[in-house]
Amino acid sequence: MNFQCGQYLLQLDRPHIMGIVNVTPDSFSDGGRYTSVDLAVEHALKLIADGADILDIGGESTRPGAEPVSLDEELNRVIPVISALAKQIKVPISIDTYKPEVMRASIEAGADMVNDVQALRMPGAVDAVANSQAGVCLMHMQGDPKTMQLEPHYQDVVAEVRAFLNERKQALLASGIAANRIVLDPGFGFGKSRAHNIALLKNLQDLADLDSPLLVGLSRKSILAAIAGDDEQRLPASLAAAVISAMKGAKILRVHDVKATVQACKVLAAIQ
Ligand code: PT1
């Protein structure tokens, strides 16, 4: 399975590690530590040295309860970071955004991939990526970040997430976006109860037959603390989740702890 990701063609023959670079003062887990462009770039370079295959740059938190940020604020955070990185790195740069204007400006500045928790549902989002070579991650979310964890409900969470991702994928194909530019993501923690998240992880292979690579983001999420008990970094549970995801067919793992996840995946590779 290959993945066209801007100027890169990734052979997803082993799990690829997507390192998280938050450029937002209220960001999840790294809250407040990387607020300036320089610190975000420095963190990104560290993740590459640790073995990241892709970087995911985000300027607006989408964790439960997060408040939206304005378009100008988001652009001010992410564009200088993408511009600085594009000049000096040899791994694809992903932009984590649902705003079409941020997608366009990011691609212009050198981003290779658009990672959208809204699955390109904002008006203009499909057009913003269509005339580029950018890779696209379509993620499932029920509701919106502010209220999504209040009362998540499904008849059959796996079937409903699968149907949604398939529908969004078909919409992109219909607008001329090549199949090998698309990856799909069940959206762990986005409008899902503990039972919903567990059902999705357990049945991840049911999403693999949509014939697109799967991206999984479980790193440091509250579902892991709920299962394993909380600690500072939620690292042991995050590593377990990464290996389980990879065993069940995930091709891209979106993580904070790149070095540890690379090592965990090597143990899996040794037996495959
Ligand atoms: C994700 C993801 C993302 N997650 C993709 N992009 C976040 N493609 C941001 C919690 O319960 O899974 N896939 N971009 C971060 N979102 C959350 C959600 C962070 C829930 C924390 C929680 O702790």
Image (tube, rainbow, N blue to C red):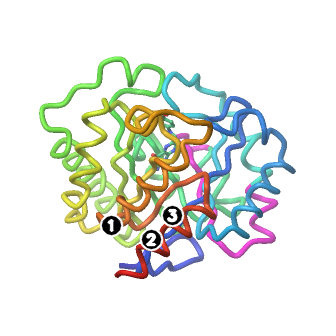
Query: Measured from the top left, where is residue 36 in percent x and y?
Result: 84, 42
Question: Which of 234 and 147 lies nearest the eye of the viewer?
Answer: 234
Residue 111 placement, left or right of 248: right
Find residue 142 and name its label: none
Residue shown at the point (78%, 50%) measured from the top left: 40
Residue 195 placement, left or right of 5: left
Residue type at tag 2: Pro
Which span of residues is magenta-colored? 82-101
Q: Secondary structure at mark 1?
A: helix
Residue shown at the point (23%, 57%) measured from the top left: 207
Q: Nearer the viewer, mark 2 or mark 3?
A: 2
Tag 2 near tag 1, CB within 8 Å: no
- Give the residue at mark 2: 15
In this rendering, does residue 85 appear at all?
yes
The magenta stretch spans residue 186: no
Spatial CA distance of label 2 from label 3 is 28 Å
- Give the residue at mark 1: 247
- Looking at the image, the residue that sits furthest to the right is 38
